[in-house]
Amino acid sequence: MVNNKHSTWSLPGGAVEIGETLEQAVIRETKEETGLVIEVGSIIAVIMKRFSQNRDITV
């Protein structure tokens, strides 16, 4: 869990970069937000969130 900019707790997350797999994004975002190096197991959920008018991003 990370304390986000709204002073609430959430799981690490973020955008998948161009050319990056979902697994690579999970590893990168977790390290960026927590400093932890992780291994990815089974994916149990994927959430789509619109960050701009013309672009949907998988997080």
Image (cartoon, rainbow, N blue to C red):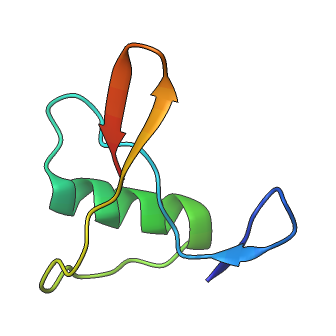
Residue drawn at x 52%, y 68% as measured from the top left: 12
The picture places residue 26, in percent across and down from the top left corner, at 31, 63
Q: Is residue 42 left or right of residue 45?
A: left
Please state which of residues 49 and 59 is positioned toward the viewer in this rendering: 49
- Residue sitting at x 23%, y 82%: 39
Residue 11 is situated, as x and y percent measured from the top left of the image, at 54, 75
**Where on the picture, by quarter, is residue 18?**
top left
Vertical side of 50 occupied by 25: above or below = below
Residue 47 position (above or below residue 10): above
Which one is in front, 38 or 2? 2
User: In the displayed structure, would residue 56 be above or below residue 32?
Assistant: above
Q: Quadrant of the N terminus?
A: bottom right
Residue 56, picture quadrant: top left
Q: Position of residue 7 (x, y in %)?
A: 87, 68
Q: Residue 5: where, in percent of width, then height?
A: 81, 56
Point out the residue furthest to the right here: 7
